[in-house]
Every structure is written in structure tokens, then in C-alpha cells.
Amino acid sequence: MTTMIIFHEVDDVAHWLASTKRTEVFGSRGISIRTFVDPAKTNRVGLIAEIPDMAVFQALMASPEAAEAMKLDGVRPATLVALVQS
């Protein structure tokens, strides 16, 4: 199991929090997530992801499905930073 912290900016935090798309996309691949909001910078959010198979995760993140999910959730892809637990 790999644990990652993923930060990025979104257009609308309330919309991002209310969306079920993350859970649908990640959950269908056995990836569990917890969401976080930066209280000092209202458009920055984060996730802790528990990833059972990194190859599956990497393929997902490179897919049109992930791009569409990020677009739907208002994610700003250029701001994405992912850290892997060491």
C-alpha cells in the first residue's frame, strides 16, 4: 500500500467538496481518499490517498477519465503536487 499526499487548487472549494466524482473514480480502483482544505488559501485543497497498486493509479492519472473528472471538479491540473510517503 502506498500513501500519497496530493495538493492542488480548485475553482470552487464548495463544489469540489460536494462532488462525488473523486470517490467514484478512485474508489472503483480500491483507492481510499480523505479530503482537506487549506484555511489560509481558500482555493487550495488536498487529499491523502491510500493506493493499493501504483501502476493502476498512474494509469488512471494519465487517462481521459481522470482529466474529465478533474475538469468536472474544477481542479487546476497545473497546480497539482503529489508527495509519496517515504
Image: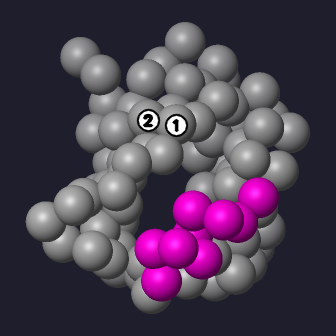
Residue type pointed to by label 2:
Ile
- Residue type at tag 1: Arg
- Where residue 38 sits, quadrant-wise, is bottom left
Q: Are marks 2 and 1 in contact (CB under 8 Å)?
A: yes
Q: Badge 2 local density, few (<14 within 10 Å), some, or many (20+)?
A: some
Quadrant (top left/top right/bottom left/bottom right) for the N terminus:
top right
Q: In this figure, which residue is indicated by the disc labeled 1?
A: 34
> Tag 2, which secondary structure?
strand
CA–CA distance in space, label 2 to label 1? 5 Å
Position of 79 relative to 28 (above/below): below
Depth check: 65 or 5 in front? 5
Above or below — where is 67 with respect to 25? below
Left or right of residue 34: residue 28: right
| In the image, residue 61 above or below residue 71 | above
Residue 78 in view: yes
Q: Quadrant of residue 71?
A: bottom right
Percent position of residue 2, x then y: 48, 19
In the displayed structure, 15 sits above or below 1; it is: below
Q: What residue is shown at x 27% (from left), y 74% (from top)?
A: 42
- Using the rendered image of the protein, determine whether residue 77 is visible from the camera's viewpoint: no
Left or right side of 31 for 49:
left
Q: Main secondary structure of the magenta part?
A: helix
Magenta range:
12-20
